[in-house]
Image: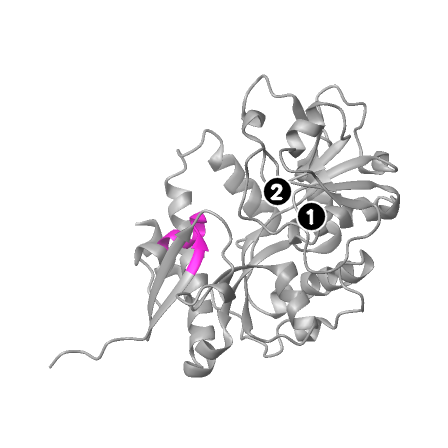
Amino acid sequence: MSRPSLPTVRLGLRDWDHLVPLMSGRVRVPGFDIRIDAREITPNVLAEPGLDGGETSFSRYVQARAAGDDRLVGLPAFVMRGFRHRCVLVRTDSPLRSLDQLTGARVGLTGWPDSGNTWTRALIRAAGVDLSGITWRVGPLAAGEVGKERLGDRPLPSNVSAMPEGESLVGELAAGRLDAILTPFMPSEFFTSASRFRHLLDDHPAAERAYWSATGFVPGIHLVTLKKEVVEAHPGLPAALLAGLEESKHHWLGRRRILTDTTPWLLHALTESATLFGQDWMPYGTASNAAMTAAFCEELYAQGIWPDPIDPAVVFPEPFPEPVAPGPSASATAAA
């Protein structure tokens, strides 16, 4: 007798390292056939009928929830997260060395309502800079980049403008028409000895460690979402998928701790991270991300991205049980 087929769930996700075990089938989600479509850019889940869920901007998801739009169900699994101190770039000859020196500056950024840029502006705001006194310009990091919605659906503040077609952040920064840029990804020349750009902060890791000590979290940028109708058809899917994402993450970490020769200093980064953050610097689960979620909701309102205060309870209205990390036997399997 043939086995009954499992419900197929199609997800659009970028190929983050910690998702590879799930993408490859090494990790499976009991009761479901998870098919992952690896993407170059973050998909618009609602705009693609062939997707049941996928990677979604935290900012856009929270704003939708605040507006009463529940077409997507977010899982407290932030597949993209990271400190933002490293995301402020200036020219190598710039006199600027600290966030508070951005007062009155001309700053370019890759998207106005974006999650990562919201977190970066939060750092600038915390440094005592009036965001309304900065001249903001929004555009692509490099010329020719397409496929990204950069301005959002709400009216822009008067000090924010879109770059004309053909201009780019790196071009304007290099020409001296911008004093700094905010970008989650580094321009290609940043990885060369002849780069015209540097980080604003000379020691951004130190600033990031201080941020962790003060807040207890690493900012979340993108999370996994499922379409509401898929969840209604399969109520057990969210918890099962969250558990699968958790297992995939730990499997990946176990393998990386063995296969450390993929970069010259990966072992150092892994040991330093474990010492500072413990065994999991990117925890999944509602409670584990409560402080970070509340801080993000506060920033969306404080920066005028959303017009009203946002109750963090609307983000994950049905609390998920905290996912359980694989035990020693599973870790041993991952390292084998």
Residue that appears at 73% across and 31% down: 200
Label placed on residue 138? none
Residue at screen point 30% across, 57% down: 26
Q: Nearer the viewer, residue 93 or 45?
A: 45
336 left or right, relative to 92: left
Instruction: Tell me, yes or no, if residue 326 can be seen here.
Output: no
Above/below status of 204 relative to 76: above
Compare residues 254 and 26 and report the one nearer the observer: 26
Q: Is residue 298 above or below residue 159?
A: below
Q: Nearer the viewer, residue 305 or 234?
A: 305
- The question of residue 15 being in magenta is answered with yes
Estimate the x, y position of residue 261 in percent, counting from the top left.
39, 33
Does residue 316 appear to the left or right of 325 in the view shown? right
Question: What is the CA distance from the residue labelled 1 to the residue labelled 2?
Answer: 8 Å
**Residue 72 occupies which quadrant of the picture?**
bottom right
Contact (CB < 8 A) between labels 1 and 2?
A: yes
Q: Look at 24% across and 76% down and name the residue there.
A: 5
In magenta, the rendered stretch is 12-21
Circle 1: is it few (<14), some (14-19), or many (20+) Cα within 10 Å? many
Amino acid type for the residue under numbered disc 1: Asn
Q: Percent x, y for residue 219?
A: 65, 53
Residue 130 location, x and y as percent? 88, 46
The residue tagged 2 is 184
Q: SS for tag 2?
A: loop
Residue matched to label 1:
117
Give the image location of residue 13, x and y in percent. Answer: 45, 56
Asked if residue 178 is positioned above or below residue 33 in the image, the reply reads above
**Quadrant of the rendered structure where residue 183 is?**
top right
Q: Tell me, what colour scheme is on the image? A: one colour
